């Protein structure tokens, strides 16, 4: 039955969940909208279900088990219903938001996941395990994204955040590991892999991998599976120190929060041994072309890969000491 009557079964179960979550008067107010709400929700939930079964080996491809028993999938199911109601433009007045929130709250109780009904989530979304995951109101998530447990897609502040766009935007085919926090209206490009426990507060370009190495987050461009070597960096006083397993690269440069190089900074190698290089930074006025957008990162390029160390400790302070007051700054 699951194969031939798949969408009929999904339709009936979604209707059951909706009726179970609302009181009779609320269901009655939805009667005129039910066909449209369920048609779109069934389409999206069916795709989510197929994606979950095909991408999660623990499910063994059992769509029926995921649909009936997986708590994390319940959060997505209730979100899909709630979002369709949230998008209604007439006929419900203030009841629209109440109903939508009641549905997502039902999903939160069932799964430990909070998804605001206004969030825009693309097709074939997988929320795996997912207990403790929070997805804030102005989030936008592209197609084919996969998110694990304890993830926060939140604002950069706590109380009194602005009412404008304040949550992240994820591109297509983004994978987010357990415990990741992506904060503020940052943009995560397509095909990005974010390893567990990372904290993201700036834009990440497409086709990148973000991970933590020796307490410094690194961003690798190119093949996410490339794992050769590691780098770490920190600045003390007037020196920048680069540590690594394989210090073989063609170029090193400081880049700003938008991953643009700072041509007015020259890096002179002061000393080197097998796993350590020490640099002095100096001002090069010929390259000056505008303000610096903090926080700063360190980009290391070789013929095989490009690695960006995100906000190495002490780098912002070192650069400020070199350039201030010669050039204006933006950011932290």
Image (cartoon, rainbow, N blue to C red):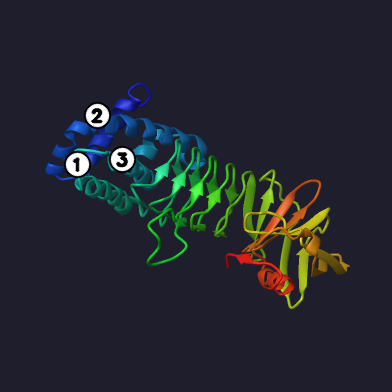
* Residue found 43% across the figure and 53% down from its top: 165
Provide the secondary structure element on which disc 3 rests.
loop
**In the image, 29: left or right of 14?**
left
Q: Distance between the residues labelled 2 and 1?
A: 15 Å
| Residue indicated by mark 2 | 35
Q: Which residue lies under the disc numbered 1?
A: 92
Answer with the quarter of the image where residue 6 lies. top left
Q: Name the residue located 27 percent from the left edge and 38 percent from the top edge.
A: 88
Toward the viewer: 61 or 26?
A: 26
**Which of pointers 2 and 1 indicates the residue nearer the eye?**
1
Residue under numbered circle 3: 87
Element type where label 2 sits in the image:
helix
| Of marks 3 and 2, the one in the foreground | 3
275 or 261: nearer the viewer: 261
Marks 3 and 2, Cα distance to the nearest angstrom?
Answer: 14 Å
Q: Which of marks 3 and 1 is nearer the N terminus?
A: 3
Query: In the rendered view, does 173 fall on the left or right side of 106?
Result: right
Return the residue found at the far top: 4
CB contact under 8 Å: marks 2 and 1: no
On the image, the x and y values in percent for residue 48 come to 42, 36
Q: Give residue 22's mark.
A: none
Dot 3, crowdedness within 10 Å: few (<14), some or many (≥20)?
some
């Amino acid at each position: 039955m699951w194969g031939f009557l798949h969408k009929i079964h999904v339709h009936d179960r979604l209707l059951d969940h909706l009726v179970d979550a609302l009181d009779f008067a609320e269901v009655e107010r939805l009667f005129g909208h039910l066909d449209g709400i369920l048609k779109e929700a069934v389409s999206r939930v069916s795709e989510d279900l197929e994606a979950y079964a095909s991408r999660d080996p623990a499910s063994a491809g059992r769509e029926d088990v995921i649909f009936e028993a997986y708590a994390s999938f319940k959060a997505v199911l209730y979100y899909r219903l709630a979002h369709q109601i949230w998008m209604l433009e007439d006929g419900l007045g203030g009841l629209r938001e109440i109903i939508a929130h009641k549905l997502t709250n039902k999903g939160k109780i069932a799964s430990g996941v909070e998804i605001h009904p206004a969030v825009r989530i693309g097709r074939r979304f997988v929320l795996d395990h997912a207990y403790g995951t929070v997805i804030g109101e102005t989030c936008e998530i592209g197609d084919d994204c996969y998110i694990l447990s304890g993830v926060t897609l939140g604002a950069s502040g706590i109380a009194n955040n602005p009412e404008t766009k304040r949550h992240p935007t994820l591109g297509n085919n983004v994978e987010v590991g357990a415990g990741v926090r992506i904060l503020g209206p940052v943009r995560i490009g397509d095909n990005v892999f974010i390893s567990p426990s990372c904290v993201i507060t700036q834009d990440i370009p497409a086709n990148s991998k973000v991970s933590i190495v020796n307490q410094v987050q690194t961003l690798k461009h190119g093949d996410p599976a490339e794992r050769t070597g590691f780098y770490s960096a920190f600045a003390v006083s007037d020196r920048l120190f680069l540590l690594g397993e394989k210090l073989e690269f063609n170029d090193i440069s400081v880049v700003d929060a938008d991953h643009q190089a700072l041509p007015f900074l020259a890096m002179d190698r002061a000393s080197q041994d097998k796993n350590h290089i020490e640099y002095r930074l100096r001002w090069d006025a010929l390259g000056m072309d505008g303000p610096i957008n903090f926080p700063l990162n360190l980009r290391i390029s070789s013929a095989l890969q490009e690695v960006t160390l995100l906000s190495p400790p002490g780098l912002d302070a070192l650069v400020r000491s070199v350039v201030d007051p010669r050039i204006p700054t933006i950011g932290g």
